Every structure is written in C-alpha cells, then in structure tokens.
C-alpha cells in the first residue's frame, strides 16, 4: 500500500500526488513510469514519474482527470493509500552531454519532462525550455522548470500568458539559428509531439518523444501498447516510452489511443453521476 | 450429468458385489467414463467451468479400469513422475485423501494439472489399457481422476503441507506462475524461507491472466496459492524484478541465498503483415489479459474490451482456442479460427478443439491472413486471406503449408486476435546483463536448471519458450531440487544460526 503524502491541485483538472514508494523512488531514472490501480477492479493507469525524493521515499506523479479511472484517482486524498503501484517501468531517458538541448512540454507533459530537463542540465547541457498550454491556468510546474532552464519560453494558445503561439513557433526559430540545438525532447499531447517532430525534421535535429499509449501489464507481456516506429512494431512499455519522433507513426498511434473512446465516455458519464459531479460533456 | 452418474452407480454396484477380484479382462470391459459438461449452447454464453468433473461413482469406475501394470508407463509419461497407479488404486478403495497426498509428493497443483495438462500426449499416451484397446482415447482418464481427488480435497479444506524446521536460508522466486509456485513449495518444504515476487497485482501468472475461467476457475488457483501462503511462503505483488529491484541486488544486498527466475512468456509475436496495428487487432495476450485478469466481461470491472461482432483468431494452439471461445462468450456473432495447416498439425489439445467446435467456433484450415483491412478511422473491417496446401515436411516434421497462388479472398471482420506465440520476456535479460541467453532471449540453464550466474536458477517458459503448465512445473521441480541441494551443502559447510533479514 502506498500512502498519498501530498495532494496538490495544479489547475482545474490537474493534480499532483506525492506517494510513498521508497523502492521506486530509489530506483527510478528520468523517463520512467509507474502503473497504478485505485482498487482491484480498477483499470491499470500508466503515469510518468515527475520527480522523486529518495530520503522521503516518495515519488511525484501529475495527472489530469479525464476519464473514470483518473477521476477516481483525483477523488483520493492525503492519507489515503493507493493499493497497487508498480514501477519504475520503461527504459530510462538517454542522458548525456549533447551540448544544447531544447525541452518542449505541452500541458501536463511538463511533468514527465521535468526530471529529463533536470538530468540534461546536470549532465552539463545548455537547456532551453519551451512550455505551452491552452491558457495561463493550465501552465504547471513553472517555478520548478524555471530553476532548471538556461532559457525559458512560455506560450499559450490564447495569449493569456507568455507568447501567444503554439510551441512549434519558438521551436522552429531556435532550429533556424546558426547554432542548431543538438537534441530536442518533446513531451505532451500526441498531436503536439507529432508537430514538434515535423518542425525539427527539415533541420535534421534529433527529436525524442515520450509516448503514453494504452497498456495493461506494462512489463512486456500484452502488446497492447505497440506503436509503429520506423516501419517496425515496437512496445512502448519495454522498448520505450521514448522513441525517435521522426520515426513514430503518430497518426496510427492517435487512432489506437481512441480505441475505447465510446466506452470511456460512457464510463466517465456514469462516474460523474456516481461521484456527484455535474457532467461536463 | 445425473444419467452418467446413475449409469456408473449401477455398474459399480455390480462390480462391488462380486466376490472374486477383477481380472484384466473385466477391467477392460468397463466403459470409459465420459466427462459431464455444460451444454455447448448454454456454456458458449457464460464464463462458468465447461467440464463439471466426475461424480464419486464415475471416478471409482474409471479408476477400476486401470490394469495396475507393473511397468507403469504412465509414470514415465508424466513430467513430474506422479505415482499414478498408486493414487488410482487409492481411489478404487475410496481413500481419496491418500490419493491426493500421493499426487502431492511430486505435484503441488493437482486441481490445476487435472484440468489443463495435455494428458493425451503425456501420461495417457503410453497407457497399457489404451494400447490393449487399440485406442489411445480409451486410456484411463488419469487427468480427470487427478482432478476428482483434488476437488474432493479442496471441498473438505486443503491439508497443509508439512514444512521442515527453519534453516535460515532465503530463496527469492521471480514470477508466480506454475514454475515459480512449484519452486516455492519444494524449497519451502525443506525449511528455507521463500519470497515470491510478482509483477501483477494478483499472483498466479498465466493461470490467472491467460487461461480462462471456463477452463480453470480462478478460485481454484487462489486456493492453491492460499495453501502456499499457509506454508509460510511470502508473496509480494506489484513488484517487478529488474525494475523495482535488480536481480543481483536480491543476492548481493537483500540477503537471498538463491534466486529462481520464472518470468514466463513475454512479448507477443505478430505476423508482420499490413494492418496489424489497426484498432481491433489484439495479441492473444492482451485479449485474454483484459478478460481473465482484468475481468473485462464483469460490469464491476473498469477495464474495457471491444464489443465484437465478427472475430478471427489466427493460430492453432491452446491459446488460440481460449481466445476464440472467450470471443463467443463476450457475445460475438461469428468467431472464425484461421490456421494455415490442417487440424492434424494443430498444437491445441483435442479436447479444446472439440469444445471450441461444439460451441460454434468455425475452423478455417489451410488458410492464412495476408493483410488486415481497415477503414478511415483505423478500425478493422476485414482481412484478406490466402488458401494453402500441404507440401514437403519442414524442420518441425510437419508438412509445410504452401500458399495457393491467386486464392485470395476477403473475410469481413471487426476484430482479429493474433495467437501465434510469444517471444521471451526481455526484462530480466536487459536489466541483468550477466545472465546468458540464447538468440531468442531464452535464459540458458544446465540440466539442473542453473544459469550462468552463481546461485541463480531458471525454468518455465523463460527457458523453454512457450510451453505448458506441467512442463513449467517439471522445470520448477528440477531447479528446486538443485537449489535445495546447494543450500543443504552450504548448511553442512557452515551450520550458522538462522539470521533475520529485513528488506
């Protein structure tokens, strides 16, 4: 059992939990994820680890309440115990001294990006951070990211904070400079990662993306998380979650992510009724 | 079911009333006892167990068929060498408790093996009775008898296995499938403490996530696991060795004296054909895990499964049969099993093939998928297939299926389940570079189940590639014997006081 030590609401539907998991806190490396269940009958939810505190024995996760399972998670409070938590899973990020690294985070993608940016900075890279969200309220972990960044660019779709732009705009400008970045790491909604990869492709700047597909076991058994990368089938849980963004078939991945949309919408609606929340959709 | 029981009772009364002992001729004359089962039409829409088990009368009558031959070829056909004639004679004399204990000397999971072992190619294949009757199908139904006594015991409460005094030695078992559970029991019996590490939230491995409820009720697996816990075996779920803790740390830092790796089958194989990543294409592992482990068919469970109308399952093994029969039970209108050879070459057990057909699975033999077709939403709408004919024998000795040119045709579908096997799980290999594996990532062991790393043993599918529950158990027994031998030797060398470790 894993106690929720701290619960913070970062924006309307976005929550941060610090959870007791000393073994995972000690072993985890940037880029890795956990799978949790709020009960024996609950779905297995994969979530990337945003941070860890080895001395406190806790890991930090950030998630958005979008469907039934994440709403049930969001309904848990400090002191509650998460019955099932497995990890750290996935291949850690390859962190090295690349030179200059641009870290692009969209929405709650900033959370999994955080340990990677921190690792890149520690490895001696010049780190530029681009953070984007629909609107100002959805910008998360700004202070944490600012403390890492050599250069920080914030964009919002509606211009309520920072530049009124999509993250691909500043990314393109940076790639157009004489000194192109050596590496781009982009984490966020699939559509954002797809367009970040499209932006950097003509400049030949290697771009790593972190995929969060539907998965069950997360340990290389079920194959539900498979994606097409460079024309080959790869498994996000063991081969990933990070892949070369220029090789990922995003269109196929986005379609597969929608496989259970109808069932999910129904369960979500029922969940709102059960939790006494007014349905938003 | 009652008719079968009544008939058996009558015959049994006649035989019991006889004063002279039964002669082989009399035994051979007893009719093989049919296994009662749910009606095919009824069972195809529920997840309850298909076969219902022998009544006491049927079991005793079937047991009387055994010729009790001296050479007992059945024992050598059994991967764990159960003393089969002995437990069968105990059934005849109504000593069911004794029969279970005879089995449990070498097999801790009789209620599971009695259900899922391929007895027809193991203990029942060389049966003298079957040979005498010139029909292997008429061999003594050893598996059904094993199931009968195991169910008898479970109904009364499983007797705890005796455990020798604590030795202070500690063994880590990675994976709680058939290999891991067998090792845990055999090692624990010798007084060593055992911790099983399981990645899933429930122990049981393939017996929980893979084999469906209607073939192996989960309550039975749970009862067997409870027996192990009662022996003092500790099980840590949600714990994946290689990630939560490195394998070598178990030995170097956590005070374990030996490790057994039983991590099982891994990454599902795909055909590498067009359309394989469309929505509606599943590996059998995913399909079965959603259904069996995550209980997707139960409204109480949050894990969804696609509502399919027309399903094709690719493959001819037991897993393919399980997937096809699950699809029927989830309400599919049509379930097609597509296999590129003929039924003779199918690896699935005869009983599973028979049950699948009875329930309405349509067999497409000498056919195979060429590509899977989807619509603009990326969902499966059909599959292009090719017809095959059998050519010359291949490496496996089976005649090689050769595609017939121009025989393409389209099957309209919304779901495809790929059940063509697994590659081995890559986690231990990737996180334990010290351990030697072969080209297909299976862990290499010597004849005693020992790996290239000192004090590390392995067995089951991670060594064999995809196999059966009983073969995994056989490997577990062998590894457990060498672990016990190694620990006994180290105890003799330094009879230190038992030490307590906390991790």
Image (tube, helix red, strand yellow):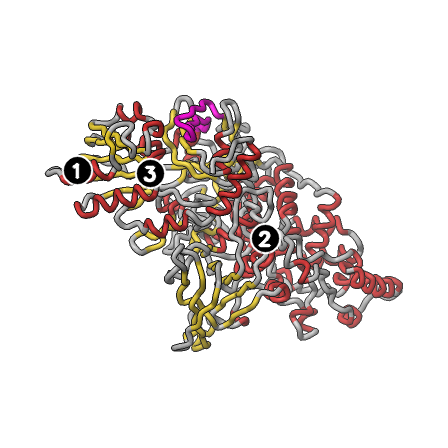
What numbered label is drawn on residue A173? 1
Q: Is residue B89 left or right of residue B478?
A: right
Residue A12 sits inside the magenta stretch: yes
Q: Position of residue B85 (x, y in %)?
A: 70, 59
Q: Residue at x 54, y 48 (%)?
A: B209
Label 3 residue SS:
loop
Crowding around mark 3 (Cα neighbors within 10 Å: few <14, some 14 to 19, many 20+) is: many
Say how many tags the image has: 3
Say which chain tag 1 marks. A
Name the chief secondary structure element in magenta.
strand
- Tell me the SS state at disc 1: helix
Where is mark 3, residue-wise?
Answer: A188
Where residue B354 sits, quadrant-wise, is bottom right
Mark 1 and mark 3 in contact (Cβ < 8 Å)? no
Q: Is residue A240 left or right of residue B244?
A: left
Marks 3 and 1, how far apart at CA: 20 Å
Nearer to the camera, A20 or B237: A20
Q: Position of residue B250 (x, y in %)?
A: 45, 35
Q: Chain of mark 2?
A: B
Which residue is depicted at the point 32% across and 28% down? A136
- B6 with respect to B371 (left or right): right
Q: Which residue is mark 2?
A: B212
- Which numbered disc, 3 or 1, marks the residue that appears first in the sequence? 1
In the rendered image, the vertical position of residue A55 relative to residue B188, given as above or below: above
Q: Is residue B464 visible?
A: yes
Dot 2 lies on which element? loop
């Amino acid at each position: 059992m894993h106690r929720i030590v701290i619960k913070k609401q970062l924006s309307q539907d976005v929550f941060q939990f610090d959870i007791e998991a000393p073994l995972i806190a000690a072993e985890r490396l940037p880029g890795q994820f956990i799978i949790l269940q709020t009960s024996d009958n609950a779905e297995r939810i994969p979530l990337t680890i945003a941070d860890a505190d080895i001395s406190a024995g806790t890991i930090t996760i950030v998630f958005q309440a979008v469907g039934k399972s994440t709403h049930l998670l969001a309904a848990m409070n400090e002191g509650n115990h998460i019955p099932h938590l497995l990890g750290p899973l996935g291949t850690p990020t390859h962190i090295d001294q690349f030179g200059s690294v641009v870290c692009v985070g969209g929405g709650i993608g900033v959370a999994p990006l955080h340990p990677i940016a921190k690792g890149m900075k520690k490895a001696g890279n010049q780190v530029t951070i681009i953070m984007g969200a629909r609107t100002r309220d959805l910008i998360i972990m700004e202070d944490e990211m600012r403390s890492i960044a050599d250069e920080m660019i914030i964009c919002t779709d509606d211009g309520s904070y920072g530049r009124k732009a999509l993250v691909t705009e500043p990314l393109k400008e940076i790639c157009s400079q004489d000194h192109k970045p050596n590496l781009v790491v982009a984490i966020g909604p699939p559509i954002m990662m797809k367009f970040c990869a499209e932006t950097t492709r003509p400049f030949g700047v290697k771009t790593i993306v972190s995929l969060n597909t539907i998965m069950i076991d997360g340990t290389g058994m079920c194959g539900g998380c498979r994606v097409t990368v460079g024309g080959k089938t790869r498994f996000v849980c063991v081969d990933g979650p990070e892949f070369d963004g220029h090789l990922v078939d995003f269109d196929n991945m986005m379609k597969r992510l929608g496989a259970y949309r109808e069932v999910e919408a129904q369960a979500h609606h029922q969940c709102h009724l059960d939790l006494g929340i007014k349905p938003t959709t | 079911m009652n008719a079968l029981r009544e008939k058996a009772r009558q015959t049994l009364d006649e035989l019991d009333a006889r004063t002279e002992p039964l002669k082989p001729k009399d035994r051979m004359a007893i009719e093989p006892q049919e296994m009662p089962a749910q009606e095919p039409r009824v069972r195809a829409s529920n997840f309850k167990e298909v076969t219902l088990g022998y009544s006491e009368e049927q079991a005793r009558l079937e047991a009387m068929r055994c010729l009790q031959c001296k050479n007992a070829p059945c024992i050598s056909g059994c991967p764990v060498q159960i003393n089969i004639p002995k437990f069968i004679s105990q059934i005849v004399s109504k000593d069911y408790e004794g029969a279970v204990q005879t089995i449990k000397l070498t097999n801790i999971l009789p209620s599971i093996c009695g259900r899922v072992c391929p007895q027809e190619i193991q203990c029942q294949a060389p049966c003298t009775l079957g040979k005498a009757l010139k029909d292997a199908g008429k061999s003594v139904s050893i598996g059904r008898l094993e199931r009968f006594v195991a169910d008898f015991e479970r109904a009364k409460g499983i007797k705890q296995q005796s455990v020798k005094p604590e030795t202070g030695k500690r063994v880590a078992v990675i994976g709680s499938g058939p290999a891991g559970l067998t090792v845990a029991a055999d090692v624990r019996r010798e007084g060593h403490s055992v911790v099983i590490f399981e990645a899933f939230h429930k122990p049981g491995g393939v017996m929980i996530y893979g084999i469906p409820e209607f073939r192996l009720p989960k309550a039975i697996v749970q009862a067997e696991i409870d027996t192990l816990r009662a022996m003092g075996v500790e099980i840590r779920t949600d714990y994946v060795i290689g990630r939560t803790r490195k394998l070598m740390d178990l030995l170097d830092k956590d005070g374990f004296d030996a490790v057994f790796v039983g991590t099982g089958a891994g990454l599902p194989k795909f055909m590498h054909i067009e359309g394989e990543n469309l929505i509606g294409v599943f590996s059998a592992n995913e399909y079965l895990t959603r259904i069996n482990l995550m209980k997707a068919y139960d409204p109480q469970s949050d894990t969804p499964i696609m509502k399919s109308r027309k399903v094709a399952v690719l493959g001819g093994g037991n897993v393919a049969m399980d997937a096809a029969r699950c699809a029927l039970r989830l309400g599919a209108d049509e379930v097609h099993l597509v296999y590129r050879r003929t039924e003779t070459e199918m690896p699935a057990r005869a009983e599973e093939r028979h049950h699948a057909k009875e329930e309405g699975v349509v067999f497409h033999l000498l056919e195979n998928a060429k590509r899977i077709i989807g619509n603009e939403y990326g969902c499966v709408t059909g599959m292009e297939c090719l017809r095959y004919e059998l050519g010359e024998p291949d490496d496996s000795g089976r005649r090689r299926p050769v595609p017939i040119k121009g025989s393409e045709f389209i099957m309209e579908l919304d779901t495809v389940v790929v059940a063509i096997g697994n590659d081995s799980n890559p986690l231990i290999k990737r996180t334990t570079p010290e351990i030697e594996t072969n080209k297909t990532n299976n862990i290499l062991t010597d004849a005693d189940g020992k790996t290239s790393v000192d004090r590390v043993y392995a067995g089951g599918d991670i060594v064999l590639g995809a196999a059966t529950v009983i073969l995994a158990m056989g490997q577990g027994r062998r590894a457990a014997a060498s672990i016990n031998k190694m620990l006994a030797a180290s105890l003799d060398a330094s009879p230190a006081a038992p030490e307590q470790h906390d991790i």
